[in-house]
């Protein structure tokens, strides 16, 4: 149990906490768990992360929430895997299949040509349906989020490796804020002509902050309250 001095320190604490979120866990569950475990008054975040995805989640503690725009506006870096030959209503593997295609059309030449369409400014429309995982749920559910308007994102780098025998290909991506990776994968599959959906995703960086500096969520839950402050980086240092 925390003593009064520790509770006062946590009450006055502010800064950035970098967390390595595991796949399969809603990012909101991470925010709630940190706030509850360490008796924090205000915990925000610098950008959501789908339950399917793992990787860097930036939590804003106390007054650091005033810097939310700096984090939200930073570029993102991802690695992941996509499944060729399958289209889903959520643009990821947890959605309902709405079409299939012959992944054999994804020759190196056609992949290279398709990738040229996904560099620079790209227009995206978020799919109506989204795969979600409720806290305590054993699986993914399909949520209807309604129709969405088209918006503009920017892709700096999108590289896709040759697929394996199961037509799964890994990829690396650097893009601007707001990019919907599963939709980028879906649109890439449409350009190829065989369809594609997101299989896995890991966010490795937001701006200059990287997942290498983040604490795994499981280890964070084992941290004593007296050791928590050392994990929080002052905002001025984090944004250098």
Image (cartoon, helix red, strand yellow):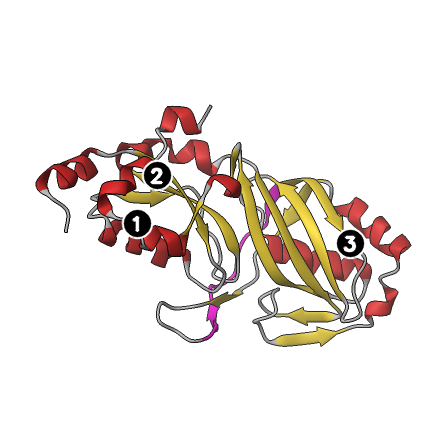
| Nearest to the observer: residue 65 or residue 122 | 65
Note whether 173 is above or below 66 in the view shown: below
Q: Residue at x 46, y 69 (%)?
A: 143
Residue range of the region highlighted in magenta in the rendering? 139-153
Q: Check residue 146 for magenta coloring.
A: yes
Q: Would you name the residue on which mark 2 appears?
A: 231
Mark 2–mark 3 distance (CA, rounded to whole Å): 36 Å
Q: Nearer the viewer, mark 1 or mark 3?
A: 1
| Depth check, front residue: 217 or 169 | 217
Q: Secondary structure at mark 3?
A: loop
Q: Nearer the viewer, residue 112 or 122?
A: 112
In screen coordinates, is 121 left or right of 180?
Answer: right
Query: Which residue in the structure is indicated by mark 1?
Result: 223
Instruction: Point out residue 214 in the picture as x, y percentages from the top left corner.
Output: 45, 43
| Residue 156 counted in the magenta span | no
Q: How many numbered marks does the figure carry?
A: 3
Residue 223: give x, y in percent of width and height.
30, 49
Element at label 2: helix
Q: Is 183 on the left-hand or right-hand side of 117?
A: left
* Residue 50 in the image: above or below residue 223: below
Nearest to N terminus: mark 2 or mark 3: 3
Nearer-N-terminus badge (2/1): 1
Instruction: Rate crowding at label 2 as few (under 14), some (14 to 19) or many (20 or more) other CA atoms within 10 Å.
Output: some
Would you call the spot at circle 3 few (<14 residues within 10 Å), some (14-19), or many (20 or more)? few
Label 2 or label 3, whichever lies nearer to me, is 2
Quote the CA–CA distance across marks 1 and 3.
38 Å
Q: Write down the residue under mark 3.
A: 161
Labels 2 & 1 near each other (Cβ < 8 A): yes
Q: Residues within 10 Å of mark 1 (few under 14, many from 20)?
A: some
User: In the drawing, does residue 221 fall left or right of residue 174?
Assistant: left
Q: Is residue 192 left or right of residue 214?
A: right
């Amino acid at each position: 149990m925390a003593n009064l001095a520790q509770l006062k320190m946590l009450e006055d604490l502010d800064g950035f906490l970098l967390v390595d979120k595991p796949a399969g866990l809603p990012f909101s569950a991470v925010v709630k768990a940190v706030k509850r475990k360490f008796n924090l008054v205000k915990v925000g975040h610098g950008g959501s992360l789908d339950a399917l995805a793992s990787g860097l989640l930036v939590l804003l503690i106390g007054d650091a929430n005033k810097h939310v725009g700096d984090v939200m506006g930073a570029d993102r870096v991802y690695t992941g895997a996509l499944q060729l030959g399958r289209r889903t209503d959520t643009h990821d593997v947890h959605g309902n299949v709405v079409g299939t295609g012959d992944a054999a059309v994804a020759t190196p030449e056609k992949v290279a040509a398709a990738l040229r369409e996904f560099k620079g400014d790209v227009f995206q429309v978020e799919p109506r349906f989204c795969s979600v995982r409720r806290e305590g749920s054993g699986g993914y559910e399909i949520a209807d989020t309604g129709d969405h308007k088209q918006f503009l994102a920017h892709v700096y780098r999108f590289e896709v490796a040759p697929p394996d025998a199961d037509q799964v290909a890994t990829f690396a991506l650097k893009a601007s804020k707001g990019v919907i990776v599963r939709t980028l994968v879906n649109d890439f599959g449409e350009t190829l002509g065989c369809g594609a959906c997101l299989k896995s995703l890991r966010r490795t960086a937001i701006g200059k902050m990287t997942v290498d500096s983040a604490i795994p969520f499981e280890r964070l839950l084992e941290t004593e309250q007296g050791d928590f402050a050392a994990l929080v980086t002052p905002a001025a240092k984090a944004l250098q």
